[in-house]
Image: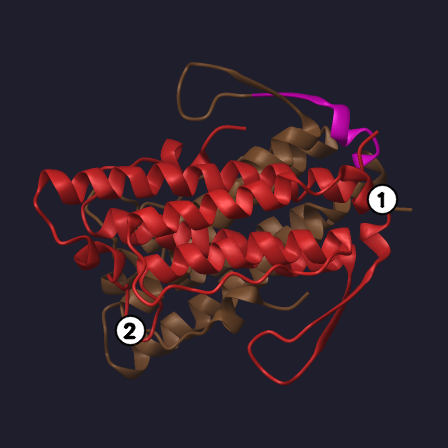
Chain colours: A brown, B red
Amino acid sequence: MTAPLYNASIPVFRQMLGSLKDILAKTEAHATARKIDPDALLQARLFPDMFPLARQVLIACDFAKGVSARLAGVEVPSFPDPERPGFAELNGRIDTVIAFIQGLPADAFADAATRSITIQPGTPRERQFVGEQYLLHYGLPQFFFHVTTAYALARHNGVELGKRDYMGKI
Amino acid sequence: MTAPLYNASIPVFRQMLGSLKDILAKTEAHATARKIDPDALLQARLFPDMFPLARQVLIACDFAKGVSARLAGVEVPSFPDPERPGFAELNGRIDTVIAFIQGLPADAFADAATRSITIQPGTPRERQFVGEQYLLHYGLPQFFFHVTTAYALARHNGVELGKRDYMGKI
């Protein structure tokens, strides 16, 4: 039997990162067909103090990478964020993260549920979790937030997408 | 030990339904303070063929209710959807769903991971899952989609919210 927290993280991240790639592919095709500057879509925001589409993709990747690594008990790999990523760079980042998380052995997650995890989410204040709580009540809600917001931004800007594109393939 | 699929569903739905209530409370306060017609916010959409805010809340409730019931092996309760729900009705629906899912006994989820689940998502075509796959690859992605989209709609319309409101309390 595989570790429950492996099943609840890696294949879920894999599914939704695949969706993100499909969403980006349709967004890029939309830009090309209508001769829209890619940045007009990738730098679109739902509100001025929210992150733009490109950054939503990068943050979704960061959560998939960081949550998976911490649950597996390995160091979180660092990938420098490009200043103004284009479609190719965003797709490359997603591929890199998919390769990283799929390379994590399932047996590294055997003790993940009770592993003590400390994070510093953008502030000096630390936050303590045990692994199960960290995945279910922090990692997954954060990850889905950014995938959904990327979808919402593409939809809001007229890209023809449906729930099926968001749900992806299991 | 509680059933893993209980932990991965009920407390997660509980957390995010609590967030939805907080998001609605701030949205209502925003409408009141600026003398905005509640429907101007509750019927706001990110794109003409997407569901408005009120409907996003109802659908999030439907997924929390339906996924929890199917995993527990009990009948999915039916709550008729109001035509144009106001804040009070949406809050009432969230409370009803929280009470329903918290009333499900944890031991009803003991066999949830391997339970065979058949759904008909808005089409005559049936879809088959086993419980674990149903929750992780269908139920949670769908639920988070609608919670996040509700948040995105409120933010897009100027309600002062932050990620903390979305994340809620564990």
Q: Which residue is mark 1?
A: B110
Q: Report if residue A33 lies within the magenta region.
A: no
Question: The residue under label 2 is which amino acid type?
Answer: Gly
In this view, the residue in front, B79 or A110, is B79
- The residue positioned 68% from the left and 54% from the top of the image is B69
Residue at disc 1, secondary structure: loop
Q: Which residues are magenta?
A: A109-118
User: Marks 2 and 1: same chain?
Assistant: no
Q: Which quarter of the figure has residue A119?
A: top right
In-image side of A18 versus A6 (left or right):
left
Residue at disc 2, secondary structure: loop
In-image side of B160 versus A161 (left or right):
left
- The residue positioned 32% from the left and 35% from the top of the image is B162
Q: From the image, state whether disc 2 or disc 1 is nearer to you.
A: 1
Tell which residue pokes out farthest to the right in this image.
A1
- The residue positioned 58% from the left and 34% from the top of the image is A137
